[in-house]
Image (cartoon, coloured by chain):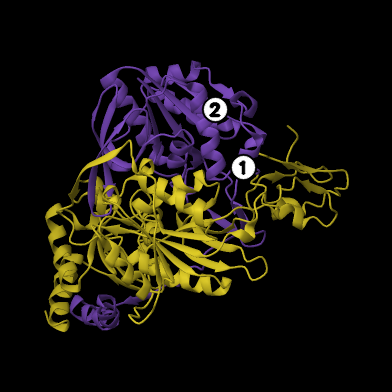
Chain colours: A purple, B yellow
Amino acid sequence: MRYVVCIKQVPETTDVKINPETNTLMRDGVAAIINPFDMYAIEEALRLKAKTGGTVTVLSMGPPQADAALREAISMGADDGILLSDRAFAGSDTWATSYTLAMAIRKIGNFDVILCGKQASDGDTAQVGPGIAVHLDLPQITYVRKIESIDEKTIVAERLMENGYEVIQSPLPCVLTVVKEINEPRLPSLKGKLAAKKAVITTWKAADLQCDPKFTGLEGSPTKVVKIFTPPARQGGEMLKGEPSEVVPQLIAKLKDAILGAAN
Amino acid sequence: MSDPIKINEKCVFCGACVKACPFGAITQAERKTVPVIDLMKCTLCGACVASCKFEAIWMKEKSAAKIDLSSFKDVWVFAEQHDGVIQSITFELLGEGRKLADSLGMKLCAVLLGSHVQERTAELIARGADKVYLVDRPALEHFQDESYANVLIDLVKRHKPNVFLCGASTIGRSLVSRVAVRVNAGLTADCTGLAIDPKTLNLLQTRPAFGGNIMATIETPNARPQMATVRHKVMKEAEINPARKGEVSMETIAEVLLQSKAHRLKFVPEVETTMNIAEANIIVSGGRGLQTPENFALLRELADVIGAGVGASRAAVDSNWIPYSHQVGQTGKTVCPKIYIAVGISGQIQHLAGMQSSDIIVAINKDADAPIFKVATYGIVGDLFEILPLLTQQFRKVLGK
């Protein structure tokens, strides 16, 4: 079985600020990590591999520095890493990103399960996983919280919904996006760290993927960011002071109307 | 391939572009040198081009639209139904969609997929739909990613909507991501603001990114439909007017489009939940300060009395005090209820990312320096084990329960 995990390198914190003088994102000194949701996807692929045998390939589109994210995945136990890095990919939105990743997965070939985190912590769109599925004309199971069974032809997985979960059966190959509940990612082993150091990361450019330039980067991205800004800061609130017997009636007086209003 | 953006010899090294770049992609090693654009960070947003007074930055122009944008008409809303019940997010979309349709001078249409749902079309019309596209087939009884997407792709190709809105629910996000790719549309996730640009008539889609620390406005200048998922509880529900008239269009769909490789074996409703927190107008949320899983009972009691859903911080979920579906925050759910009551939650940035757009935030915590107080509308420093039961008891009296 061949497992392909798509990962993204993101800033370690979402606590980014806009410099009010220059109106630019202040990202200096913020470390880059693997998107937290992708860690669960890597872990799940490793667990599936332990069950069925096979290989785990990690795939990322990003700047040359994203090499570090792929090596970290290898240190956890992934077999190999592929980086998609090309100036032609600059300006990609989720349409172009899912196209580019899908072209790479096609080139990898022979895949059975493609795993992604449910969304990235910087963009929060949750659109790339399903996008890959459509570009490859594959079924998908999104928001997976548990894989109930897998064999060479079929997977049964639980999808987390707002009010419960669905049990979904899909033939392979198939695209999964996973939520945090699915597992607890392992820490890299010493052996893994050594392997990651020695690993040769394959880099593919647009030409290697036979991408149609109409569909990559800026040209392939229907959406355009026209403005970024800081949301208005919440005003520091009112502190209610006193013994519980004093503050509770105060709070109730403040909330009563809102609660009655919310009930309607 | 040549670079899509370049700084040419007209550059006077003023550094204006370095400051203008929202993504920190332009650096200038020292004064009197030409700045360098890091194309891996650059999103080709054009902010630097606008900032340069010397026309020294050249950016590749995106090809103009290859399709006739004017042939795309009307504002569509995907009507999400579970077991034949139209979900409230749909009414919020109709409320917002009405405004957009009016400013574009177009019709507001709802798209309803399901089995035996025809009588539900009246509800959609009463909430403002001028037209309902109905696909009523046994195969569409439950949501299935592939068949639902296939039907929508077919309808979009056939009727060419200008704007297509969908709720940012599990179903919505899984569904329209497929549709947008297939019809070559731009799709913006999780919008909290929508407006029509009066000059270009493009849809301006505003959404939070970086866990709500940054807002971005996005448009789709050269493709149609302009697709967006919209966050629950942000837009106001359309009011009901039973006297409204509207048209129902029964759509025929090729059988092959209703097939799905993946299919649902069963649905297991969560027993724990008193209320879906994504839907709740009030949420009472507990964190590490509750100390034991048993103490969540105190929280549930208050929630019952005031009609709230129960949320939790990551710490409480990771300690297995409450299932993951209740987790609010960056790796859990993003909620924006009218009232969010945080009990024993310190307010790490990851938690704030999931709840800071709530209308009213109440924080109860024993640590006066807890960051949660910085976003709280009302804060109480004190022992939650004293305050919580008292609050429940007095609310019960006040609300007459």
Q: In this rendering, which labeled residue sits more in front, label 2 or label 1?
A: 1
B32 horizontally vs B71: left or right:
right
Q: Which residue shows up at 35% across the image and 58% down it?
A: B347
Chain that bears disc 1: A
Q: Quadrant of the N terminus of chain B?
A: top right
Q: Is residue A15 visible?
A: no
Look at mark 2 in the image and give the residue it sits on. Answer: A83
Q: Is residue B319 visible?
A: yes
Q: Which residue shows up at 28% across the image and 36% down it?
A: A183
Q: Amino acid at mark 2?
A: Leu
Look at mark 1 in the image and give the residue it sits on. Answer: A220
Q: Label 1 crowding class (10 Å Cα cut-off): few <14, some 14-19, many 20+?
A: many
- Residue B361 drawn at (x, y percent): 34, 70
Q: Label 2 crowding class (10 Å Cα cut-off): few <14, some 14-19, many 20+?
A: many
First of labels 2, 1 by sequence position: 2
Residue A140 numbered tag: none
Q: CA distance from mark 2 to mark 1?
A: 19 Å
- Residue A203 drawn at (x, y percent): 58, 23
Q: Amino acid at mark 1?
A: Gly
Chain that bears disc 2: A
A171 horizontally vs B35: left or right:
left
